[in-house]
Image (spheres, rainbow, N blue to C red):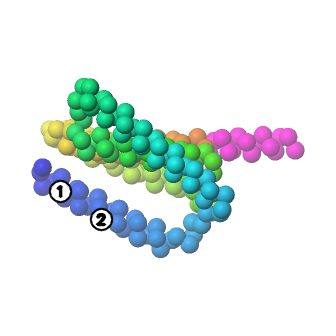
Amino acid sequence: MSTAFYIGFIVGILIVAIVSLISIKRKCRGQYDERQKAIQGVAYKFGFFAMFAYFIINGFICMEIGEWLPIIDMNFIGLCFGIVCFAGYAIFNDAYLSLNSKPFKFSLFISFVAIINYVCFFINVMDGDTPEAFLLNLICAVFLTVICFMIIIKVIIDKHNEKKELVEE
């Protein structure tokens, strides 16, 4: 692996650590009610079983045709698949964001991180590096894009339902 890869890896870990520390400090702002916590529990189960099913199916595929990607990438896809299943269930049942969170700001943040991952992947591919070395960036970007679209769809559905309720009154 190149020096740029290791520097990028370390910078990525530092960014995640900084964002995590900021999140922990702001934890009191993002409180969930009991209903949301119960829904999140169900969402964790869906995420776990989706990830479990992915790894079982992927294991059989690898036995039959061999590894279709490097092992780290296949495992990361499974992890992201479980996270997206958790997020999807929680988003569409109003348990992904806390009551006082703003979905638009959150989706902008997720979009920003996804765009950074897309840019990192495509810049490295254009520089002549092998795409496999930076495939994790692409996987992460795709799954973040899916989560962002789910949030946007949920916001649209909620606005439509609000308008419908106003018309019915």
Is 2 on the left or on the right of 71, as rendered? Answer: left
Q: Mark 1 points at which residue?
A: 6
Residue 77 in the image: state x and y as whole percent. 35, 42
Local crowd size for mark 1, using a 10 Å CA cut-off: few (<14), some (14–19), many (≥20): few
The residue carrying mark 2 is: 14
Specify which label sits upstream in the sequence, 2 or 1: 1
In the figure, is residue 84 to the left or right of 18? right
Question: Which SS type dominates the magenta stretch?
Answer: helix
Q: Would you call the spot at circle 2 few (<14 residues within 10 Å), some (14-19), or many (20 or more)?
A: few
Residue placed at 42% from the left, 43% from the top? Answer: 51
Q: Residue at x 35, y 62 (%)?
A: 16
Helix, strand or loop for disc 2? helix
Residue shown at the point (44%, 45%) measured from the top left: 82
Residue range highlighted in magenta: 155-169
Q: What is the spatial separation of the Cα atoms under label 2 and label 1, in whole angstroms?
A: 12 Å
- Label 1: element kind: helix
Does the image show residue 152?
A: no
Query: Furthest-right residue in view?
Result: 169
Q: Could you tell me if the residues under marks 2 and 1 are in contact, i.e. CB atoms within 8 Å? A: no
The amino acid marked with disc number 1 is Tyr
